[in-house]
Amino acid sequence: MTAIRILSETTVNRIAAGEVIERPAAAVKELVENALDAGATRIAVSLTGGGIDRIEVVDDGIGMTADDLALAVLRHATSKLTDDMLVRISTLGFRGEALPSIGAAARLSIVSRPRTQDHASTITVEGGRVSEPAPAAGAPGTRVVVADLFYATPARRKFLKIPRTEGDHAEAAVRRLAFAAPHVAFRLESDGRVAFDLPIQDRAARVAALLGADAAAAMIPLDAERGAMRIGGYVCSPAVNRATANAQSLVVNGRPVIDPTLKSAIRVAYRDVLEYGRHPVVALYLDLPPDELDVNVHPAKTELRFRDAAGVRGLVIGSIARLLSGAAGTDMPAPALMEHRPSMHLWQSRPSPRRGGIQALPLPEPMARDPMNLGGMLAEAQLPLHAEPYARMLAMPAERSPHPLGAPVAQVLDTYIIAVAADDSLVLVDQHAAHERLMHEAIRSQMLEGGVRTQPMLLPAVVDLPSADAARLLSRTDELARLGLEIEAFGPGAILVRALPAALGAPEPGPLLRDLADELEEMEETTALASRLDAVVARLACHGSIRAGRRLNVAEMDSLLRQMEATPRAATCSHGRPTFLKLSKLEIEKLFGRR
């Protein structure tokens, strides 16, 4: 070991830079936050090479003098912190670390001009070496250019992802800030592509512009308060959901955050109305007294500590759950089974004259009044014990099915198939989960045989997507074609769908493309699509499978059970959930207290 020594200021700054600026998105976030704190009404961001090669942020804020510039690039120099106790922080930035951290790891150039001066000033920092401020030409406001990010810290640079991935992260960071500040116009350009160009808007218009047309049509205004805390914004109907949580915007006291307490509360609020594995679309704005939270948790300032975390969690869960209870159009939860027995319905496997599915057959009125008095029910109804249709409804199949999953008896809630196996076990099948696995294996089998069969669309469909999602899909056109999905560009942010995998039938192409874009975003761009085949095929299978809520006739139910018995991995769906449950005679008797 060598003797202990004090590190040079340059080395210390480069080490500290790694805490604040871990990737281009972090640099972009810090620079845009500085622009917002400077009172900007217009902010333009331009990226080259995902922000690795170049970042430019231009604002029309209050600007800085030459003396201000000289201080701004020093560590822990800030004009924003007026409370040395760090209790009442009202600005996005306050630590005085962003500019010196960027300058320690990259080539930083700043040109700034206050509105009261007739000329601008400029300063540069390259790898920690600071120049003297000098006069320059420039409009009122500030223009910051970051070039060759991490050239001075090559160990950090080699761990960056490819430019597209880094650009996506940077776009997400600007998008979150645009959600938080609808009173500011935002423009983002990445490698010549305009991701968005938003004017000054009210909150509703900004949320609608950033969430997309499908989410905007399903937005439900939210406004609730508890004590000094208030929550506003918009939540979307459970019918509008995503494969990831990327479409959730959370803003606390004007600061965009990625907070586990809030994300957990949203998940709980939607738990009873949203399919497992899907994520709701929300834009929430929480306001509370500054001394009720700590924003000085991490240099990135995206995590918070709430003084009353339970209160915040309760406000979020309660306010969203109350909205969804009405917006979803559902009744109150059903009472317990014993309390509900007088109004129970039995289900008969009989085609419905209206929809060709299974219809509910109510019990005779006497049984509804006295469900346990079977003798009275039969006498009052004047029906023999084996009269039709009740005997056919209550009796087991005449011949026991030799198949493992048995013979279908009924469909419950237009979602679950009831079957009776050869050993008298009761089988419950989730029709959507089961068919999803069948679709998954069918597409996968076609892939292994040389390619998925396609079905050209009679009329090609045009799907509007966020420009980043459209670009992500179009960059994989050839690979998606091998999966049976034929797409092409159709103007900015639009995709023309010419063909779909034949096995899927005719799903809506819009939700399918959005889910595929989310799946591709989660994948490593350096990885070929073929190596993540199952994840992408699972998305396709989900959109091609029969849905919960679709009525099936007896032949359809029987066909589904037989295909499950002949398909590998059919015990679980593509997402790992069980496709069927089986209760033996012993287990049923235990449930009724007979054993």
Image (cartoon, helix red, strand yellow):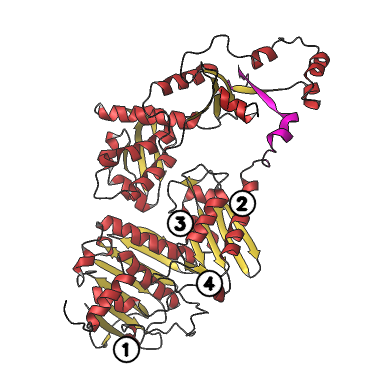
Q: Is 496 situated above or below 104?
A: above
Tag nearer the camera, 4 or 2: 4
Q: Which residue is mark 2?
A: 321
In the picture of the structure, the residue carrying the numbered disc 4 is 293
Residue beneath the point at 41% across and 70% down = 298
Residue type, numbered disc 4: Leu
Quadrant placement of the C terminus: top right
Left or right placement of residue 333 versus residue 193 in this view: right
Horizontal arrangement in the rendering, residue 150 relative to residue 31 (left or right): left
**Which label sits in the foreground, 4 or 3?**
4
Asked which secondary structure carries label 2, the reply is helix
- Upstream in the sequence, badge 2 or badge 1? 1
Q: Residues within 10 Å of mark 3 (few under 14, many from 20)?
A: many
- Taking the spot 27% from the left edge, 72% from the top edge, the residue there is 146
> Is 102 above or below relative to 536?
below
Mark 4 or mark 2, which has the lower sequence index? 4
Magenta span contains residue 470: no
Q: Secondary structure at mark 3?
A: helix
Q: CA distance from mark 3 to mark 2?
A: 24 Å
Mark 4 residue crowding within 10 angstroms, few (<14) / some (14–19) / many (20+): some
Q: Amino acid at mark 3?
A: Leu
Q: Up-down: is 536 above or below 219?
A: above
Q: Is residue 492 visible?
A: no
Kind of residue at badge 2: Ala
Element marked by disc 4: strand
Q: Say which of marks 2 and 1 sits in front.
A: 2
Tags 1 and 3 in contact by the CB under 8 Å rule?
Answer: no
On the image, numbered disc 1 is attached to which residue?
A: 66
Q: Which residues are magenta?
A: 330-357
Three-letter residue code for mark 1: Ala
Determine whether, in the image, residue 337 is placed left or right of residue 468: right
Asked if residue 95 shows in the view, the reply is yes
